[in-house]
Amino acid sequence: MRNRYEWFVGLRYLRSGHRNRFISFISLISIVGLALGVVVLIAVLSVMNGFDHEIRQRILGMTAHATLMGPEGPLYDWQHAREVALQNPRVRAAVPYVEDQAMLVNGSRVSGVVLRGLVPQEEGTVSQLAGRLTSGSLSDLESGAYRIVLGKALAKELGVDVGDKLRVIVAKGNTTPVGVIPRMRTFIVSGVFSAGMYEYDRGLAVVALEDAARLYRLGEAVTGLRINFDDVFAAPLLVRDVALSVGERYYVSDWTRKHANFFRSIELTKSIMFMILVLLVAVAAFNIVSTLVMIVKEKQGDIAILRTMGAGPRNILEIFIVQGAVIGVVGTLAGIGFGVLLADNLEFLVAAIEHLSGLSFVDEKVYFISDLPAQVQLDDVAKIAGTALVLCAISTLLPAWRAARTQPAEALRHE
């Protein structure tokens, strides 16, 4: 009965009497402020999570989990290395590739790119490139046909489309009596892909493996092997095991090394944003102090009467803790509900605002992607809720302690 009594009085004090509605308004403002802080925190962290997840998926959709290359140049005995790699039960695929820098020329338009030679029939085992083509097919990359597939932004930059011709120039030149002449070859554009990531759409072109090997004069050698494993996150360790099993010196790399600084910057930004936005939640939570102080001031007479009727300091303390707890819990739950709802529909809302205003909030040249994905993670929601509730509890203690120290005689002297 004592607990029910304290809950009843605490909840009743959140609603001021008809003589002073201002207290009820302040209580509502405290709840709304806390809820808005939680909403913003959930939305921002969800965007960071979505951005990290989307970038990772798009990177892995265009590149293999790991690569194995020669220590000082081309990989000559790649057939043996491939055979040994495929004996590892955790290796799903191992395909040869050729990759180097090149320059594409179409009239007066010039662009530097990464030129990748691949085996069209086996590319699906290490990447999703075939599914990203908007026109053409990887099967068109036949050996000796000298066809090329470009990224969407790269094709637009060069002003070419399927069926057009362009020149591919590589740094390794031919020595002639008049000097070194860059090696070049005319290719026919046979396809265009859209990876959804500007780094690849603007800077990658693919050709048949044999055509790339001839262009770079590698003979039977290749740049290395692209390897996929059964666990993408275990790639850094597994590719090292594969290299050791082959028995020679190799240079190994994986998708985490190639983009290590990028993913590290996302994690750092997420941590910084969490700390900054927690301050916003803290400001909203500390509004509870002013709310409860005003309630204590208004209810001095009631507190004194309760004390004379037998309520002890602990009972008064718990009454006002109930008020702070209700504000904190209601504000936090409301913030979580609206925050998750906003995060789930954020991509649609941003697209609608961009369409109506004509503005672009996410430039793919800067942020690598052109949309704003959001992904709500349970651990982030739990961390936000716990932080908000702890801040609310801290904010509640001082006013509740002051109310518990109220002396009945002093409080009733001016009544």
Image (spheres, rainbow, N blue to C red):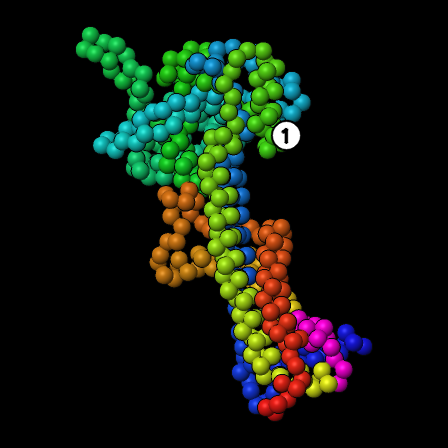
In which quadrant of the rendered view does residue 103 lie? Answer: top left
Q: Is residue 326 above or below residue 243?
A: below
Query: Measured along the vertical axis of the image, is residue 279 above or below residue 320?
Result: above
Name the quarter where the N terminus is drawn: bottom right
State the image coordinates of residue 212 (x, y, percent, origin top left): 40, 19
| Crowding at mark 1 (Cα within 10 Å: few <14, some 14-19, many 20+) | some
Query: For the point 47% across and 21% down, which residue is it?
Result: 97
**Residue found at the very far top of the displayed protein:** 177
**Residue ID for mark 1:** 230
Q: Residue 231 appears in which quarter of the rendering?
A: top right
For this orientation, the residue located farthest to the bottom is 415
120 or 334: nearer the eye?
A: 334
Secondary element type, mark 1:
loop
Q: Is residue 305 magenta?
A: no
The residue shown at (59%, 33%) is: 233
Name the spot of residue 323 as percent of width and height, x first: 64, 73
- Residue type, mark 1 in image: Asp
Q: Does 196 sit left or right of 111 as displayed?
A: right
Q: Is residue 274 above or below residue 253?
A: below
Q: Is residue 315 magenta?
A: yes
Q: Is residue 206 above or below residue 403?
A: above
Where residue 186 appears, as percent x and y from the top left, is 31, 23
Helix, strand or loop for the magenta stretch, by majority: helix
Q: Nearer the viewer, residue 264 or 346?
A: 264
- Please report the residue visible at 47 percent of the width from the left and 59 percent of the height from the top: 349
Magenta extent: 309-323
Asked if one can make out residue 126 in the rendered structure from this viewpoint, the answer is no
